[in-house]
Amino acid sequence: ALFLQFIREHGGYFPVRIETLPEGSVVYPHTPVMQISAEREYAPLVTYLETVLLMTWYPSTVATRSRRAWAALRRYYELTVDDDAWWTLGSRLHDFGFRACTCVEQSMLGGAAHLLTFDGTDTLSAAYHVQYQLNGGRPVGTSIPATEHSVMTAFRSEREAVLRLIDAYGDGVYACVMDSYDYARALAAVLPAVAEKKLAKGGVLVVRPDSGDQVDAVLEGLRAAERVFGSTTNAKGFRVITGASVIQGDGVTPASLARILEAVHRAGFSAQCVAFGMGGELLQKLNRDTMNMAVKLSSITYADGETRDMMKFPKGESSKMSLPGRFAVLADPAQAGAPVAHRSCDVPADASLLQPVYDCGPVAGHAWDDFDAVRARLADQWARLPLRADAVSSGLLAYQKAINDRQTQDVREGTAFGV
């Protein structure tokens, strides 16, 4: 009946108001990223829509995982990579996750979130969606020709497979998986056997191990490629392999990525010599609890006109305590512009970063940013904002304590339970 009512009264538009932070915003724990409200008999629609709107946890979590990997890579780029090679940073983590997803729609959402930071992707659904639906036809994702085990084992020998790859793509960048039979032997025998043709073509061969210890496999590949193709030493004193590199795409996690980068650094190679592919770990091995994202009731006005702000405060688990009231978010100049949650009554309505994007229908004058703009916002804020910040204002913290004290008293007296 409620659905039929708002179809009649509102032409099918949900009679709710949704305010959000701009897409691509960098936030901290306890920062409200959206605020949903409805009036009178339509109040239950807030809870109904919570399920759908909270699904933003997924692309937000993928985007965060991807950006943290970028931060780890950047650290080693600062240590080992010359300025004129920094353009390669955007391709150092490649999205291998399409086949790890439960459906094409998931791959589009997660793959697009990865593309907020990196260019490299084999998730074609996301690259197409971003380019043609979110970015006005301007391309974002890139990839390179690459073999996988079915291709390698289809040839009579690995040498034949690699030579065919060089014939077809040898003047560009191309990747070859090398562990179909024996990774160490392939490095020792196949690379020297194809070196003459590879060098004549002048492109970049990316060696891909896909089994064994990740650190050992990467270092073996780098050392073998250096023996065959040579290297130069850059201005920072680290070796750059000539026309070759290694990509590790088997079982990569944030922790193993960091271990590999440190091992490559200790071995004296520039970080530009290694790239990573992340599949299920990037798009599938995460959930809503990875970053503890939730939607909670914070304020209600009863039929008798009383407005009551409330919060969740489960005994014995303070980490699940929520914030009370209606919110505004301001950029705090004392924290380099970090977003800080305030009580809305303490902030002019037009000053909040939480702005309406839907109000019983489309909001006049509102337009969604294109993907390039969202990427730029993320890059700017990630570079500018501190790693940690106080994300809740002193005024809101004091109000939270007051509400908590009131609700604790209600529990003590039994009124919270209606007894």
Image: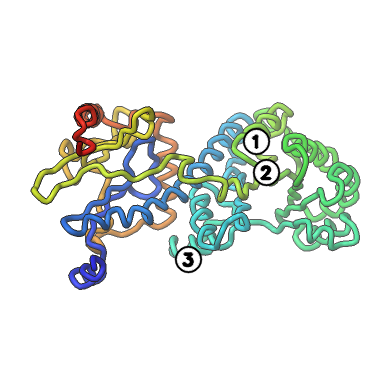
- The residue at 23%/41% (across/down) is 327
What's the residue type where badge 2 is placed? Gly
| Mark 2 Cα-neighbour bin, 10 Å: few <14, some 14–19, many ≥20 | some
Q: Secondary structure at mark 2?
A: loop
Q: Which residue in the rendered view is the most extreme toward the left?
A: 304
| Mark 1 Cα-neighbour bin, 10 Å: few <14, some 14–19, many ≥20 | few
Marks 2/1 in contact by CB < 8 Å: the verdict is yes
> Real-space Cα distance between discs 3 and 1?
34 Å
Q: Secondary structure at mark 1?
A: helix
In this rendering, which labeled residue sits more in front, label 3 or label 2?
A: 2
Question: Which of the labelled discs sits on residue 132, or is there none?
Answer: 3
Q: Which residue is mark 1?
A: 256
Q: Which residue is mark 2?
A: 251
Q: Is residue 337 visible to the viewer in this orientation of the structure?
A: no
- The residue at 40%/40% (across/down) is 26
Q: Position of residue 336 (x, y in %)?
A: 34, 31
Q: Position of residue 58 (x, y in %)?
A: 47, 50
**Residue 39, image quadrant:** bottom left
Q: Is residue 387 left or right of residue 74?
A: left
Q: Nearer the viewer, residue 56 or 411?
A: 411
Marks 3/1 in contact by CB < 8 Å: the verdict is no
> Real-space Cα distance between discs 2 and 1?
8 Å
| Mark found first going from the N terminus, 3 or 2 | 3
> Real-space Cα distance between discs 3 and 2?
31 Å
Q: Nearer the viewer, residue 14 or 171?
A: 14
Q: Nearer the viewer, residue 54 or 393?
A: 54
Q: Position of residue 242 (x, y in %)?
A: 76, 42
For the N terminus, give its image quadrant: bottom left
Q: Nearer the viewer, residue 34 or 85?
A: 34
Question: Which of the labelled discs sits on residue 64, or is there none?
Answer: none
| Mark found first going from the N terminus, 3 or 1 | 3
